[in-house]
Amino acid sequence: MAPQTCTQTSTTSPTLTRATDRCDRCGAQAWVKVNVIVSEGDLPLLFCKHHYERNEKALVQRENVAVVVDDRAHINHKPTS
Ligand SMILES: [Zn+2]
């Protein structure tokens, strides 16, 4: 397993960690982004850690839900912008 570097400079992987990404439920900073596939297309939903973990069980059971970004590992890292 390759050692994981923890930089904020990568532009290839989709990450949230932007202060402008806000939980759809409470407005706190979002750390998890999921895509819900609906008939109109993809419906992106943003969750803070609290609300994602509250809904995680129900979300992962649904076949039309895909977790695109899970940045909870970065919660204790300060975003650069
Ligand atoms: Zn929330």
Image (cartoon, rainbow, N blue to C red):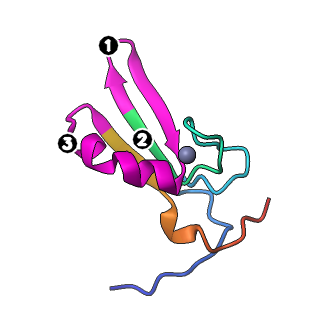
> Could you tell whether 65 is left or right of 12 in the image?
left
Q: Earlier in the sequence, mark 1 or mark 3?
A: 1
> Could you tell whether 32 is left or right of 28 in the image?
left
**What residue sits 26% from the left and 42% below the top?**
58
Instruction: Pick whichever, 81 or 32, lies toward us.
Output: 32
Instruction: Give the x, y percent position of residue 31.
Output: 54, 54
Instruction: Give the x, y percent position of residue 8.
Output: 67, 68
Q: Is mark 1 within 8 Å of ligand 1?
A: no
Residue 65 lies in quadrant: top left
Instruction: Determine if the magenta segment contains residue 75.
Output: no
Which amino acid does the dot numbered 1 rest on?
A: Ser
Residue 21 vertical position relative to residue 38 in the rendered view, above or below: below
The quadrant in which the C terminus is found is bottom right
Residue 70 vertical position relative to residue 3 in the rendered view, above or below: above
Instruction: Give the x, y percent position of residue 61.
Output: 19, 42
Secondary structure of the residue carrying numbered label 3: helix
**Tag 3 residue:** 61
Estimate the spatial distance between the alpha carbons at disc 1 and disc 2, rounded to whole Å: 16 Å
Res. 54 mark: none
Q: Are marks 1 and 2 in contact (CB under 8 Å)?
A: no
The quadrant in which the N terminus is found is bottom left
> Could you tell whether 6 is left or right of 2 in the image?
right
**Tag 1 residue:** 39
Estimate the spatial distance between the alpha carbons at disc 2 and disc 3, rounded to whole Å: 13 Å
- Nearer the camera: disc 2 or disc 3: 3
What's drawn in magenta, residue-wise? 36-65
Q: Earlier in the sequence, mark 2 or mark 3?
A: 2
